[in-house]
Amino acid sequence: MDRLTHKTSCWIFRAFISWLTFLCACDLNSAEPQRLFTVAADPNNLPFSNAREEGFENKLARIVAHDLNAKLVYLWQPQRRGFLRDTLGSARCDAVMGVPAEIGQCLTSRPYFRSSYVFVFPSNRQQPIDSLDNAQLRNLRIGVQLMGDGQMSPPANALIERGLSNNLVGFSVYSDDRAENPPSEIIRAVADKKIDVAVAWGPVAGYFAARQPVGLTVNPIPQPTDATVPYAFDICVAIRKDEPNLRDEVNAILRKRRTEIAKLLAEFGVPSASALSDKSSKAGILR
Protein backbone atom coordinates (compact mmCIF):
# COMPACT_ATOMS: atom_id res chain seq x y z
CA MET A 1 0.00 0.00 0.00
CA ASP A 2 2.84 2.31 0.91
CA ARG A 3 4.58 1.52 -2.40
CA LEU A 4 1.36 2.18 -4.32
CA THR A 5 0.89 5.47 -2.51
CA HIS A 6 4.51 6.38 -3.22
CA LYS A 7 4.15 5.60 -6.92
CA THR A 8 0.93 7.59 -7.11
CA SER A 9 2.58 10.55 -5.38
CA CYS A 10 5.52 10.43 -7.79
CA TRP A 11 3.17 10.30 -10.78
CA ILE A 12 1.18 13.28 -9.48
CA PHE A 13 4.40 15.20 -8.83
CA ARG A 14 5.73 14.51 -12.33
CA ALA A 15 2.39 15.49 -13.85
CA PHE A 16 2.41 18.72 -11.85
CA ILE A 17 5.94 19.56 -13.03
CA SER A 18 4.98 18.88 -16.66
CA TRP A 19 1.88 21.06 -16.30
CA LEU A 20 3.88 23.85 -14.68
CA THR A 21 6.52 23.67 -17.43
CA PHE A 22 3.81 23.86 -20.07
CA LEU A 23 2.25 26.92 -18.43
CA CYS A 24 5.62 28.66 -18.20
CA ALA A 25 6.34 27.94 -21.87
CA CYS A 26 2.94 29.30 -22.90
CA ASP A 27 3.48 32.39 -20.79
CA LEU A 28 6.90 33.02 -22.34
CA ASN A 29 5.54 32.54 -25.86
CA SER A 30 2.56 34.84 -25.31
CA ALA A 31 4.39 37.53 -23.37
CA GLU A 32 4.34 40.93 -25.05
CA PRO A 33 7.62 42.80 -25.60
CA GLN A 34 8.60 44.83 -22.57
CA ARG A 35 9.93 47.69 -24.72
CA LEU A 36 7.49 50.37 -25.96
CA PHE A 37 7.75 52.26 -29.24
CA THR A 38 5.46 55.30 -28.99
CA VAL A 39 4.56 57.01 -32.27
CA ALA A 40 2.68 60.30 -32.62
CA ALA A 41 0.27 60.27 -35.55
CA ASP A 42 -2.82 61.99 -36.94
CA PRO A 43 -5.98 59.88 -36.47
CA ASN A 44 -7.58 61.12 -39.74
CA ASN A 45 -4.90 61.75 -42.33
CA LEU A 46 -4.78 59.08 -45.04
CA PRO A 47 -2.72 58.05 -46.90
CA PHE A 48 -0.33 58.66 -44.01
CA SER A 49 -2.21 57.51 -40.91
CA ASN A 50 -5.58 57.06 -39.28
CA ALA A 51 -7.00 55.66 -36.06
CA ARG A 52 -7.71 52.34 -37.78
CA GLU A 53 -3.97 52.11 -38.59
CA GLU A 54 -4.62 51.90 -42.34
CA GLY A 55 -2.03 54.43 -43.59
CA PHE A 56 1.41 53.67 -44.95
CA GLU A 57 3.00 55.40 -41.95
CA ASN A 58 1.00 53.09 -39.66
CA LYS A 59 2.32 50.09 -41.56
CA LEU A 60 5.86 51.44 -41.47
CA ALA A 61 5.56 51.97 -37.71
CA ARG A 62 4.48 48.33 -37.39
CA ILE A 63 7.56 47.18 -39.31
CA VAL A 64 9.88 49.27 -37.14
CA ALA A 65 8.24 48.18 -33.87
CA HIS A 66 8.46 44.52 -34.92
CA ASP A 67 12.17 44.78 -35.67
CA LEU A 68 12.79 46.65 -32.43
CA ASN A 69 10.98 43.83 -30.60
CA ALA A 70 8.80 46.56 -29.11
CA LYS A 71 5.10 47.06 -28.49
CA LEU A 72 3.72 49.77 -30.79
CA VAL A 73 1.80 52.48 -28.93
CA TYR A 74 0.14 55.51 -30.52
CA LEU A 75 -0.20 59.07 -29.34
CA TRP A 76 -3.07 60.34 -31.50
CA GLN A 77 -3.04 64.06 -32.25
CA PRO A 78 -4.15 66.04 -35.33
CA GLN A 79 -1.17 67.40 -37.24
CA ARG A 80 -1.47 71.13 -36.75
CA ARG A 81 0.99 73.91 -36.03
CA GLY A 82 3.11 72.89 -33.04
CA PHE A 83 2.61 69.14 -33.61
CA LEU A 84 6.30 68.22 -33.27
CA ARG A 85 6.78 70.55 -30.32
CA ASP A 86 3.79 69.04 -28.49
CA THR A 87 4.75 65.43 -29.20
CA LEU A 88 8.46 64.79 -29.73
CA GLY A 89 9.53 68.06 -28.15
CA SER A 90 7.52 67.32 -25.00
CA ALA A 91 8.93 63.78 -24.78
CA ARG A 92 5.44 62.29 -25.13
CA CYS A 93 6.53 59.92 -27.88
CA ASP A 94 9.60 58.37 -29.47
CA ALA A 95 8.97 59.00 -33.15
CA VAL A 96 6.91 60.57 -35.92
CA MET A 97 6.95 58.50 -39.09
CA GLY A 98 7.18 61.19 -41.77
CA VAL A 99 9.04 64.52 -41.72
CA PRO A 100 11.28 66.35 -44.22
CA ALA A 101 14.98 65.63 -43.87
CA GLU A 102 17.15 67.96 -41.80
CA ILE A 103 14.23 69.47 -39.88
CA GLY A 104 15.79 71.16 -36.87
CA GLN A 105 13.35 70.17 -34.13
CA CYS A 106 14.41 66.54 -33.91
CA LEU A 107 16.80 63.85 -35.06
CA THR A 108 15.97 62.36 -38.44
CA SER A 109 16.59 58.92 -39.88
CA ARG A 110 17.94 58.14 -43.32
CA PRO A 111 15.26 59.01 -45.95
CA TYR A 112 12.87 56.21 -46.82
CA PHE A 113 11.33 57.98 -49.82
CA ARG A 114 11.53 61.16 -51.86
CA SER A 115 8.51 62.79 -53.47
CA SER A 116 7.48 66.10 -54.99
CA TYR A 117 4.56 68.38 -55.69
CA VAL A 118 2.52 67.28 -58.69
CA PHE A 119 -0.24 68.34 -61.06
CA VAL A 120 -3.45 66.28 -61.08
CA PHE A 121 -5.80 66.61 -64.04
CA PRO A 122 -8.30 64.47 -65.99
CA SER A 123 -6.60 61.78 -68.05
CA ASN A 124 -8.72 62.63 -71.08
CA ARG A 125 -7.16 66.09 -71.30
CA GLN A 126 -5.72 66.48 -74.80
CA GLN A 127 -2.67 68.50 -73.75
CA PRO A 128 -0.99 67.48 -70.49
CA ILE A 129 0.12 70.08 -67.98
CA ASP A 130 3.81 69.70 -67.29
CA SER A 131 5.11 73.06 -66.09
CA LEU A 132 4.13 76.08 -64.00
CA ASP A 133 4.80 78.12 -67.13
CA ASN A 134 2.35 76.11 -69.24
CA ALA A 135 0.14 78.63 -71.10
CA GLN A 136 -2.98 76.51 -70.47
CA LEU A 137 -2.91 77.44 -66.78
CA ARG A 138 -4.02 81.00 -67.54
CA ASN A 139 -7.47 79.70 -68.52
CA LEU A 140 -7.89 77.05 -65.81
CA ARG A 141 -9.21 76.86 -62.26
CA ILE A 142 -6.21 75.68 -60.25
CA GLY A 143 -6.62 74.05 -56.85
CA VAL A 144 -3.80 74.69 -54.37
CA GLN A 145 -3.15 73.51 -50.83
CA LEU A 146 -3.25 76.04 -47.99
CA MET A 147 -1.08 75.26 -44.97
CA GLY A 148 -2.66 77.68 -42.50
CA ASP A 149 -1.76 81.21 -41.40
CA GLY A 150 -1.79 82.28 -45.05
CA GLN A 151 0.99 79.88 -46.02
CA MET A 152 0.89 78.14 -49.39
CA SER A 153 2.91 75.40 -51.00
CA PRO A 154 5.99 76.50 -53.01
CA PRO A 155 4.31 75.90 -56.41
CA ALA A 156 1.23 77.87 -55.32
CA ASN A 157 3.44 80.83 -54.46
CA ALA A 158 5.14 80.47 -57.84
CA LEU A 159 1.75 80.63 -59.59
CA ILE A 160 0.96 83.89 -57.77
CA GLU A 161 4.32 85.30 -58.86
CA ARG A 162 3.30 84.42 -62.43
CA GLY A 163 0.15 86.52 -62.14
CA LEU A 164 -2.29 83.63 -61.69
CA SER A 165 -3.70 84.50 -58.25
CA ASN A 166 -7.22 84.94 -59.68
CA ASN A 167 -7.10 81.40 -61.03
CA LEU A 168 -6.38 79.80 -57.67
CA VAL A 169 -8.88 77.92 -55.51
CA GLY A 170 -7.63 77.17 -52.01
CA PHE A 171 -8.07 73.87 -50.16
CA SER A 172 -6.90 73.74 -46.57
CA VAL A 173 -4.86 70.73 -45.55
CA TYR A 174 -6.45 71.29 -42.11
CA SER A 175 -10.06 71.11 -43.25
CA ASP A 176 -13.00 69.83 -41.18
CA ASP A 177 -11.81 66.85 -39.12
CA ARG A 178 -15.39 65.60 -38.91
CA ALA A 179 -15.06 64.61 -42.57
CA GLU A 180 -13.16 61.44 -43.35
CA ASN A 181 -9.81 61.93 -45.07
CA PRO A 182 -9.78 65.77 -45.26
CA PRO A 183 -6.69 65.86 -47.56
CA SER A 184 -8.68 64.12 -50.30
CA GLU A 185 -10.89 67.16 -50.92
CA ILE A 186 -8.60 68.81 -53.47
CA ILE A 187 -8.35 65.62 -55.55
CA ARG A 188 -12.10 64.97 -55.41
CA ALA A 189 -12.61 68.50 -56.71
CA VAL A 190 -10.73 67.58 -59.91
CA ALA A 191 -12.84 64.43 -60.38
CA ASP A 192 -16.03 66.45 -59.74
CA LYS A 193 -14.93 69.17 -62.22
CA LYS A 194 -15.02 71.87 -59.55
CA ILE A 195 -11.48 72.72 -60.58
CA ASP A 196 -9.53 71.90 -63.75
CA VAL A 197 -6.22 70.96 -62.21
CA ALA A 198 -4.82 70.47 -58.71
CA VAL A 199 -1.37 71.29 -57.40
CA ALA A 200 -0.82 68.89 -54.52
CA TRP A 201 1.79 67.00 -52.51
CA GLY A 202 2.66 63.76 -54.31
CA PRO A 203 1.61 61.11 -51.74
CA VAL A 204 -1.82 62.73 -51.27
CA ALA A 205 -2.30 63.08 -55.03
CA GLY A 206 -1.18 59.57 -55.94
CA TYR A 207 -3.30 57.84 -53.30
CA PHE A 208 -6.57 59.69 -53.80
CA ALA A 209 -6.35 60.12 -57.58
CA ALA A 210 -6.29 56.34 -57.95
CA ARG A 211 -9.52 56.11 -55.95
CA GLN A 212 -11.69 58.48 -57.99
CA PRO A 213 -14.45 57.27 -60.33
CA VAL A 214 -12.78 58.98 -63.30
CA GLY A 215 -9.26 58.63 -64.68
CA LEU A 216 -6.82 61.19 -63.32
CA THR A 217 -3.21 61.74 -64.31
CA VAL A 218 -0.48 62.64 -61.84
CA ASN A 219 2.35 64.69 -63.36
CA PRO A 220 5.41 65.93 -61.44
CA ILE A 221 6.05 69.66 -61.25
CA PRO A 222 9.61 70.36 -62.43
CA GLN A 223 11.70 72.59 -60.22
CA PRO A 224 11.62 76.07 -61.84
CA THR A 225 14.99 77.66 -62.45
CA ASP A 226 13.91 80.75 -60.50
CA ALA A 227 12.73 78.79 -57.43
CA THR A 228 14.49 79.49 -54.14
CA VAL A 229 12.82 76.60 -52.26
CA PRO A 230 12.71 72.90 -53.20
CA TYR A 231 9.69 71.21 -54.76
CA ALA A 232 10.86 67.69 -53.87
CA PHE A 233 11.74 66.45 -50.40
CA ASP A 234 13.44 63.49 -48.74
CA ILE A 235 11.12 62.08 -46.08
CA CYS A 236 12.47 60.53 -42.89
CA VAL A 237 11.41 59.19 -39.51
CA ALA A 238 11.66 61.85 -36.79
CA ILE A 239 13.23 60.77 -33.50
CA ARG A 240 13.52 62.60 -30.19
CA LYS A 241 16.78 64.52 -29.84
CA ASP A 242 17.74 62.57 -26.73
CA GLU A 243 17.46 59.18 -28.47
CA PRO A 244 20.37 58.93 -30.93
CA ASN A 245 20.62 55.18 -30.30
CA LEU A 246 17.01 54.74 -31.38
CA ARG A 247 17.77 56.80 -34.49
CA ASP A 248 20.60 54.40 -35.31
CA GLU A 249 18.34 51.37 -34.75
CA VAL A 250 15.67 52.85 -37.02
CA ASN A 251 18.29 53.57 -39.69
CA ALA A 252 19.37 49.93 -39.62
CA ILE A 253 15.75 48.77 -39.98
CA LEU A 254 15.03 51.16 -42.87
CA ARG A 255 18.14 49.91 -44.63
CA LYS A 256 17.32 46.26 -44.02
CA ARG A 257 13.66 46.62 -45.02
CA ARG A 258 14.09 49.01 -47.95
CA THR A 259 12.65 46.60 -50.53
CA GLU A 260 9.58 45.92 -48.41
CA ILE A 261 9.12 49.64 -47.73
CA ALA A 262 9.39 50.49 -51.44
CA LYS A 263 6.67 47.93 -52.15
CA LEU A 264 4.49 49.43 -49.41
CA LEU A 265 4.83 52.94 -50.85
CA ALA A 266 4.00 51.65 -54.33
CA GLU A 267 0.85 49.97 -53.00
CA PHE A 268 -0.27 53.37 -51.70
CA GLY A 269 0.47 55.09 -55.01
CA VAL A 270 3.20 57.30 -53.55
CA PRO A 271 4.98 58.90 -56.54
CA SER A 272 8.74 58.85 -56.31
CA ALA A 273 10.42 62.11 -57.31
CA SER A 274 13.20 60.19 -59.07
CA ALA A 275 10.80 57.84 -60.87
CA LEU A 276 8.62 60.72 -62.06
CA SER A 277 11.37 63.11 -63.04
CA ASP A 278 11.06 62.63 -66.79
CA LYS A 279 7.55 61.37 -67.44
CA SER A 280 3.96 61.59 -66.28
CA SER A 281 2.30 58.74 -64.48
CA LYS A 282 -1.34 57.76 -64.46
CA ALA A 283 -2.77 57.44 -61.00
CA GLY A 284 -3.14 53.82 -60.07
CA ILE A 285 -0.22 52.85 -62.36
CA LEU A 286 2.46 54.46 -60.23
CA ARG A 287 3.99 51.12 -59.41
Image: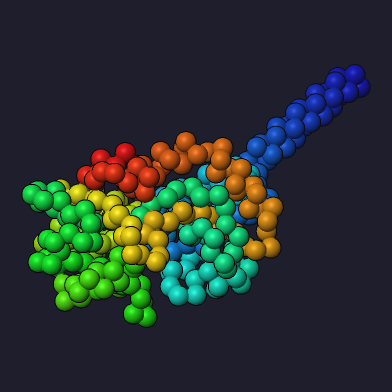
Q: Residue at x 34, y 80 (%)?
A: 150
How far from the left and from the top, in percent, is residue 160? 25, 73
* Mark count: 0
Q: Left or right of 178: which side holds 241?
A: right
Res. 253 image quadrant: top right
Q: Left or right of 124: which side holds 188?
A: right
How far from the left and from the top, in percent, is residue 266? 36, 42
| Front residue of 44 and 219 | 219
Q: Left or right of 207: which side holds 78?
A: right
21 up-or-down from 64: above or below: above
Q: Which quarter shows the N terminus?
A: top right
Q: Left or right of 138: which side holds 108?
A: right
Res. 255 image quadrant: top right
232 up-or-down from 251: above or below: below
Res. 12 image quadrant: top right
| Front residue of 5 and 24 | 24
How far from the left and from the top, in percent, is residue 282? 22, 44
Q: Can residue 10 be seen in this view?
A: yes
Q: Which residue is drawn at 65% across and 53% down?
A: 246
How far from the left and from the top, in percent, is residue 270? 35, 48
Q: Which residue is drawn at 67% across and 58% down?
A: 243
Q: Which residue is drawn at 55% across and 44% down?
A: 254
Q: Which quarter shows the C terminus?
A: top left
